[in-house]
Image (cartoon, helix red, strand yellow):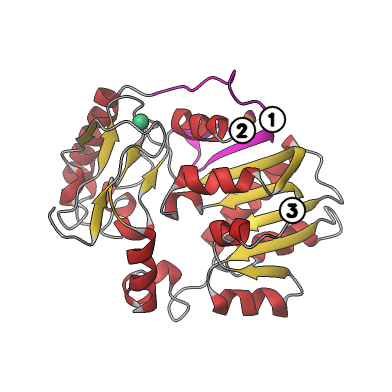
Amino acid sequence: MSDQTFTLYPCDLCAGNELAEIPVAPFYMDGRPLHVCKACGFVQAAYRRTPEALQKMWAEEIYRANDARVSDKTYTARIPAVVARQTFAVEFLAESVDIHGKSLCDIGAGEGQFLEMLKQPRFDMDVFGIEPSSENCAILTDLGIANFDGTMEDYAASGKTRRFDVASLIWTLENCQSASGVLAAVHDVVKPDGHLVIATGSRILMPFKKPLQYYLGSNVDVHPFHFSANALTSLMHKAGFQVIAHNRFIDSDYLVLVGKRVDDAKGLALPTDDWHEIVDCFDRWHKETQAHYADW
Ligand SMILES: [Zn+2]
């Protein structure tokens, strides 16, 4: 790719420069490549727009027009499938950490239904949302949810010093320009001994739960990262959150990890995946999809 809009980034997890293309991915991604890091096995679109180019694209409304998931004209998060996964994240968090009466900051708060669940008397959380869509911030305000209109990095740079008992990234981290960059910023808004919960629909190396065309798409600019449990654990450990709980992701559609903030992350394990196994996983997924589900 020689288009100057795109920059070839090193691995977002380990900063390695040895990246292999996943051969079957461009078939589902309008010819655009998906990479796996040869050192740590993290799956990522290494050709990404710079934050500046992304901002320009958003300003030109291409983002909204091309991705139904973020278009407030065609998408609402209040559909059963989304409510179900938000509910799972709430229940898993509540099972893992004592959250009653605590403060929580949700990064990428969307229309606020996750925060509404946590406001209920059962949890009675003091909730706050960080959300880059002004339209969604207006919805949050209408719901009585305090919010910041911008990205996590904008919030960190704004000089706000509020710290929270819990931070949450619910189906958001895969959509960031830099996953490690966001997590570094999150660390600064969590209290010492506070917690971070990350939930995602990525679960690389697990049994396939959907045809590959439902997983990979041309929306690389809004979905550059694909997590395995190992990759997400390492990202959290590098950012100073020691993983204390994970769901049983082998037969779930979700991968949910909870981490506890630590001041010294040096001793935490950084588990990796074998990049050959990742490529093989996608090959098998592609074959299965084409043999049985290509017409869906
Ligand atoms: Zn790597």
Mark 1 residue's CB less than 8 Å from ligand 1 = no
Q: Is residue 209 left or right of residue 164?
A: left
Q: As shown in the figure, which amino acid type bears the numbered disc 1?
A: Asp
User: Dots 1 and 3: beta carbons under 8 Å?
Assistant: no
Residue 170 bears which disc, if any? Answer: none
Q: As shown in the figure, which amino acid type bears the numbered disc 3?
A: Leu
User: Dots 1 and 2: beta carbons under 8 Å?
Assistant: yes
Q: Position of residue 13 (x, y in %)?
A: 42, 35
Q: As shown in the figure, which amino acid type bears the numbered disc 2?
A: Gly
Q: Position of residue 144 (x, y in %)?
A: 77, 74
Sequence-wise first label, 1 or 3: 3
Q: Is residue 39 above or below residue 106?
A: above
**What residue is shown with label 3?**
104
Residue 263 bears which disc, if any? Answer: 1
Between 252 and 60, the one nearer to me in the picture = 60
Dot 1 surroundings within 10 Å: few (below 14), some, or many (20 or more)?
few
- Residue 147 in sight here: yes
Q: Quick check: which quadrant has ligand 1?
A: top left
At x 81%, y 61%, the residue is 120
Membership of 134 in magenta stretch = no
Q: Is residue 215 above or below residue 70?
A: above
Q: Position of residue 19 (x, y in %)?
A: 24, 34
Dot 2 surroundings within 10 Å: few (below 14), some, or many (20 or more)?
many
Sequence-wise first label, 3 or 2: 3
Q: Is residue 69 left or right of residue 49?
A: right
Sequence-wise first label, 1 or 2: 2
Q: How many marks?
A: 3
Residue 240 bears which disc, if any? Answer: 2
Membership of 247 in magenta stretch = yes
